[in-house]
Amino acid sequence: MSCNGCSFNNNSTSTIAQGYDWLSDLPDTTDKSDIVEVKFKSTRKEYYKNVENLHLKRGDRIVVATSPGHDVGEVTLTGYLAEKQFKLRIKNPSRYNLNVVYRKASDNDIQTLNEARSREKATMIRAREAAKELGLEMKIGDVEFRGDNKKAIFYYLAEGRVDFRELIRVYAREFRIKVEMKQIGARQEAGLIGGIGSCGRELCCSSWRTDFSSISSDAALKQGLSPSAQKMAGACGKLKCCLLYELDAYIEAGNEFPRELLDLELESGIAKPFKTDFLKKEIWYGLAGSMGTTFNLSLKQVRDIIQKNKRGIKPELHTFSAQPKEQNKMEVTLDERLDRFDKKKPSRNKKRRNKKGGRNFENKNPQNKQNASDNSDTSKRPNKRRNNNPNRKRKQGFKGKKGAQTSNNAN
């Protein structure tokens, strides 16, 4: 079953590099700026000028000018937001030469684009084989054909400088197109391919992130995270980009801590620090020579103990550490039966004792209790319904004895 997308991305199944228009519920701002943000394959975005004053909205397919030729892309932002993103992403906006928007894409333009995209997979496989035959230490990550099917961009990864002049001649001769080589990094390759991160969400590099600044292991250490390469590595094999999202908050909170955490001298021994929680402003200590004895102290308590140690005082631990709170224990019963959530049906074999005349009839029926209290004066009378006549059972026994006496007298 395939996904039909959602209203957020105009029912598009792909969310790679989709811009977010947070002014969509406000009046149109296209009259304030003629800059248009256009998305092409994967994460490539460029900016164009709407000189024809076309009525464009997000999701429209348009034909834009290139040098030379033309390309087909999808509108992601217009108006004020497009201009704002243009100034953020382009270093020198005043010196940037904006190409123009020709028109909205027709059916022929879409058909030509689909024909060009159908050549990309076979071209990428052959491009990798050609690079391997020439002995070049590079990897072709992806191939993107232009909308007019006359030019292609070859994205490659390489650790060092690569002389691919002969490779360009081979590509131009075999594919009969104009060739453009573009070097990318591991993070950009992950953005081109896309995927799901360890958090369960779409990769940041393929959904919204455009800048790929360097990340060091020091960012993980400043946040108190494990410097393990496997846990901190993303889909690209490098450190996760999300390590930078909260780094400034941790650095600001870490400024309140001392640069070097000292050992604490307590009455029970020497406590050594091994963990810090910057946001809660707590430090975890462990007693030297005592296995498994750990406790946490607030930053204020640590400063008080350090001041007492300087005066030669060794405080007791229980005066600073809080007593552990008793947690409510929950009893969990593991039941693997498939019908454990089904409602239990009442048993038909059990006799109902709440009928009229049963054992619990008087107790369950409040009306009977009231009648019993009203007729308390008549409770001494014999109840014929319940066979309370004392002479009834004795009558049979008396007959038997009488019969026995008459038989003896006869004898």
Image: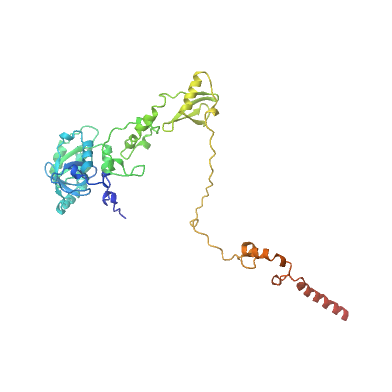
Q: Is residue 377 above or below residue 261?
A: below
Query: Where is residue 328 shown, x and y percent of the image?
Result: 53, 42
Does the image show residue 255? yes
**Frontmost residue, 409 versus 82:** 82
Color style of the picture: rainbow
In percent of width and height, residue 1 lies at: 32, 55
Q: Quadrant of residue 353?
A: bottom right
Name the foreground residue: 108 vs 351.
351
Please provide percent x and percent y for residue 266. 53, 24
Residue at the extreme bottom: 410
Quarter of the figure with residue 241 = top left
Q: Total label count?
A: 0
Give the residue drawn at x 62%, y 62%: 364
Left or right of 82 on screen, residue 340: right
The residue lying furthest to the left in this view is: 68
Whether residue 180 is situated above or below residue 269 in the rendered picture: below
Looking at this view, is 410 or 115 the one in front? Answer: 410
Where residue 86 sits in the image (x, y, percent)?
Answer: 21, 38
The quadrant of the picture occupied by the C terminus is bottom right
Residue 204 falls left or right of residue 328: left
On the question of residue 132 being in view, the answer is: no
Residue shown at 37% from the left, 29% from the top: 252
